[in-house]
Image: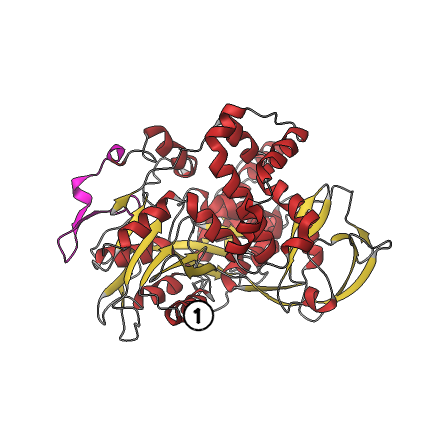
C-alpha cells in the first residue's frame, strides 16, 4: 500500500494539471480588456466503477464513466489516505500548466492580480506621492498636484518615519511593503508621521486616500518651432485620452509634425494603440488584424475620426518596445504614413485573453497572433524556451545588432511590401526605416560604475533636498538648467561618488563629462517639475531623438 500511495503522490500534480486543462477548455473565456464573463474554477464531478474481482492491495484498474482525468482527480479527493487541499494544488500547478506554452501566457494569483492590473487601469487608490528610499528612510520627491497628500500639507523633502502605528524609518523595511501600507481603498484614512527639515518635532498628518492617476504619456512639448515630441511609456485605459489632450496643447502651439517616442514601452492595451493609429490614417485603412487557431480573422480599420491625417510623423523604437507599441509602429510603417526610427523592436505579436476565477485569480492565455497591415507577424521565435527568449537582448548585443544594422539577417520568406513599394520584414520585431545605433560616445568605466550604483540619481536627490528653496522658484527646464549651469555640479558629484566608494578617474570623467552633467541636471529638474524638467534637458544627449528631429525636418 505504501508504494501505491507514493506513486499516487508523484502523479497528483500531473493529474491535477490535466484536469485543470479540461476545466479551462470548458470555461468561458474573457479578455483582460473585453471582459466577457466570470467563470468558476469548480471541477465537475465524475464517478468511476471498479471492475469486479479487482484487488486494491495488489493493483487495480478503473473503468471511468465520463472523462477519466476528472474521474482520477475525484478519486484522489475522495479516497486519498491524507487530506488533499485542492486550493494548494491549484496554486502550485497553475504556473506549471502554462509554463510550456508561450512566454506571455501567465497565471496570476489573486494576491497579485491588483498589482498586475493597476498600470493598465490608469489609476489606484493611495495618498498621492512619489518617493525615494534614502538612507533607509522614505523621502518624498513630489506630491501629486491637488492630491490627498498635498491637500493636507505634505511637502517634497519630507521624510516618512511612521505609517499608522508602524515605524518605517531605519528598520530596513522593503519599499514594496511601505507602498502596500500607503495604498488602500478610496476614502479610507491613513496616519503618516513625517520629519521635516527645520522642524524640531515630527509632524502628524491624517490623509484620506483617493484615486491617484497613473500617467502613461510622460511628457509632451515642442522640440522646435513646428515639431512636437510625445513620450508614451505604456498603453493603458487612459492613454488615448492623455494623448489627445497632449495633441490639443501642441496644436495650440503651432505644431504640425510629431515625434512619438515608444522606446522602452512594453505595450499594454491594444485598443489604446489602435485608437492613436486611427488619428493618422485615412478611413478604411487597415490598422491591425488578429487570427488564431480557434479565432477567426478580425480586422481593425481606421475610421473617419482622424485629426492628424496631414501631420508628418515619426515613431521612435528600441529593443524594449513591444506589443501595442509594435502595433502602432507597424500601422504607421505599413501604410506608408511615416517613418520608424531607432532599433529593431522586441517582437511580441501574441494576443492574450483573460479568464477570471472565482477566487480573484486569473489566467491570461495566448489565443491569437496579431498581424500588421501588410500581413507580417512580428512575433519572434520562442521555440528554444523562455530563457533564450528573454535573453535575446544580450544576444543582440553580442551579435553587434545594437551597433550595426547589417548584423541583422532576414529570411526572404518574411519579406513584405507596403502599398508604396517599401520592403518590410516580419518574424521578429519591427525593423526601423532609419537605424540609430546605441550611443557609446560618452561611455567609460567610471560612468558605467556610477550609473550601475545609481549615484547620479542619488546625488540629484541629495542636491535637490539641500537646495530646494532656491530650485522651487523655477517652472521650466530651461530655467532650472540655466541655474544649475552656474552651480558647478560635476566637482560636487565627483566628491559625492568618492564618499560612496567610487574614486575619480579623470581621463574617464573627461570622456563622460557631457553625459554626466546632463544626466545629473535632468534628474534634479525631474525632482522639481517632474518629467517636464527631465526630458527637455536629457534630449541634448539623446542621439535617436536628434536623428528624428533632423529626419522629420526633411519630410
- Of 46 and 117, nearer the camera is 117
- Residue under circle 1? 245
Q: Is residue 125 left or right of residue 451?
A: right
Q: What percent of the width, then of the height, locates residue 230?
A: 41, 59
Q: Quadrant of the N terminus?
A: top right
- Image coloring type: secondary structure
* 12 or 161: nearer the viewer: 161
**Residue 174: percent from left, percent from top:** 69, 45
In this picture, residue 479 sits left or right of residue 248: right
The question of residue 424 being in magenta is answered with yes
Callout 1: 10 Å neighbours few (<14), some, many (20+)?
A: some
- Write the start and end of the magenta stretch as one range: 406-432
Query: In this image, 478 relative to 461: left or right?
Result: left
Residue sitting at the far bottom = 304
Given the current orientation, which residue lies at the most extreme right position? Answer: 201
Residue 291 seen in this snapshot: no
User: Considering depth in this image, is 107 or 138 the residue closer to the camera?
Assistant: 138
Q: Nearer the viewer, residue 161 or 552?
A: 552
**Residue 163: quadrant of the picture:** bottom right
Residue name at image x 59 percent, y 58 percent: 474
Above or below for 180 versus 450: below
Q: Position of residue 301 (x, y in %)?
A: 26, 68
Amino acid at each position: 500500500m505504501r508504494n501505491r500511495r507514493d506513486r499516487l503522490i508523484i502523479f497528483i500534480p500531473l493529474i491535477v494539471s490535466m484536469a485543470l486543462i479540461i476545466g479551462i477548455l470548458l470555461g468561458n473565456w474573457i479578455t483582460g480588456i473585453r471582459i466577457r464573463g466570470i467563470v468558476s474554477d469548480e471541477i465537475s464531478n465524475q464517478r468511476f466503477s471498479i471492475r469486479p474481482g479487482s484487488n486494491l492491495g495488489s493493483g487495480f484498474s478503473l473503468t471511468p464513466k465520463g472523462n477519466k482525468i476528472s474521474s482520477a482527480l475525484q478519486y484522489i479527493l475522495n479516497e486519498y489516505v491524507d487530506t488533499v487541499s485542492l486550493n494548494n494544488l491549484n496554486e502550485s500547478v497553475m504556473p506549471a500548466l502554462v509554463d510550456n506554452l508561450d512566454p506571455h501566457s501567465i497565471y496570476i494569483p489573486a494576491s497579485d492580480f491588483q498589482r498586475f492590473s493597476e498600470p493598465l487601469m490608469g489609476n489606484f487608490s493611495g495618498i498621492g506621492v512619489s518617493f525615494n528610499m534614502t538612507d533607509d528612510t522614505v523621502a518624498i520627491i513630489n506630491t501629486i498636484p491637488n492630491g490627498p497628500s498635498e491637500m493636507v500639507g505634505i511637502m517634497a523633502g519630507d521624510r516618512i518615519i511612521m505609517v499608522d502605528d508602524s515605524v518605517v524609518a531605519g528598520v530596513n523595511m522593503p519599499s514594496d511593503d511601505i507602498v502596500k501600507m500607503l495604498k488602500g481603498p478610496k476614502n479610507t484614512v491613513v496616519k503618516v508621521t513625517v520629519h521635516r527639515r527645520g522642524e524640531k518635532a515630527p509632524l502628524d498628518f491624517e490623509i484620506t486616500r483617493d484615486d491617484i492617476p497613473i500617467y502613461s504619456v510622460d511628457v509632451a512639448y515642442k522640440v522646435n518651432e513646428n515639431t512636437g515630441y510625445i513620450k508614451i511609456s505604456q498603453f493603458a485605459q487612459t492613454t488615448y485620452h492623455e494623448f489627445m489632450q497632449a495633441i490639443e496643447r501642441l496644436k495650440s502651439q503651432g505644431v504640425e509634425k510629431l515625434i512619438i517616442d515608444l522606446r522602452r514601452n512594453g505595450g499594454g492595451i491594444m485598443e489604446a494603440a489602435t485608437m492613436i493609429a486611427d488619428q493618422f490614417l485615412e478611413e478604411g485603412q487597415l490598422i491591425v488584424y488578429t487570427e488564431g487557431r480557434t479565432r477567426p480573422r478580425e480586422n481593425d480599420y481606421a475610421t473617419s475620426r482622424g485629426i492628424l491625417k496631414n501631420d508628418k510623423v515619426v515613431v521612435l523604437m528600441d529593443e524594449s518596445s513591444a506589443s501595442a507599441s509594435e502595433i502602432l509602429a507597424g500601422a504607421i510603417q505599413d501604410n506608408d504614413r511615416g517613418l520608424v526610427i531607432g532599433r529593431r523592436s522586441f517582437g511580441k505579436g501574441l494576443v492574450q485573453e483573460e479568464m477570471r476565477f472565482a477566487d480573484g485569480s486569473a489566467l491570461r492565455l495566448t489565443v491569437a497572433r496579431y498581424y500588421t497591415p501588410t500581413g507580417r507577424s512580428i512575433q519572434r521565435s520562442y521555440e528554444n524556451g523562455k530563457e533564450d527568449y528573454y535573453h535575446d537582448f544580450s544576444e543582440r548585443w553580442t551579435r553587434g545588432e545594437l551597433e550595426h544594422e547589417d548584423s541583422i539577417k532576414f529570411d526572404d520568406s518574411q519579406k513584405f511590401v507596403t502599398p508604396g513599394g517599401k520592403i518590410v520584414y516580419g518574424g521578429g520585431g519591427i525593423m526601423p526605416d532609419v537605424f540609430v545605433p546605441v550611443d557609446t560616445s560618452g561611455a567609460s568605466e567610471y560612468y558605467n560604475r556610477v550609473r550601475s550604483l545609481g549615484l547620479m540619481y542619488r546625488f540629484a536627490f541629495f542636491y535637490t533636498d539641500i537646495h530646494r528653496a532656491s530650485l522651487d522658484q523655477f517652472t521650466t527646464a530651461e530655467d532650472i538648467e540655466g541655474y544649475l549651469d552656474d552651480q558647478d555640479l560635476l566637482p560636487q558629484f565627483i566628491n559625492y561618488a568618492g564618499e560612496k566608494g567610487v574614486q575619480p578617474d579623470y581621463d574617464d570623467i573627461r570622456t563622460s563629462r557631457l553625459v554626466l552633467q546632463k544626466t545629473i541636471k535632468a534628474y534634479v529638474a525631474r525632482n522639481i517639475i517632474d518629467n517636464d524638467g527631465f526630458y527637455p534637458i536629457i534630449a541634448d544627449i539623446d542621439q535617436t531623438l536628434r536623428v528624428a528631429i533632423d529626419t522629420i525636418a526633411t519630410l
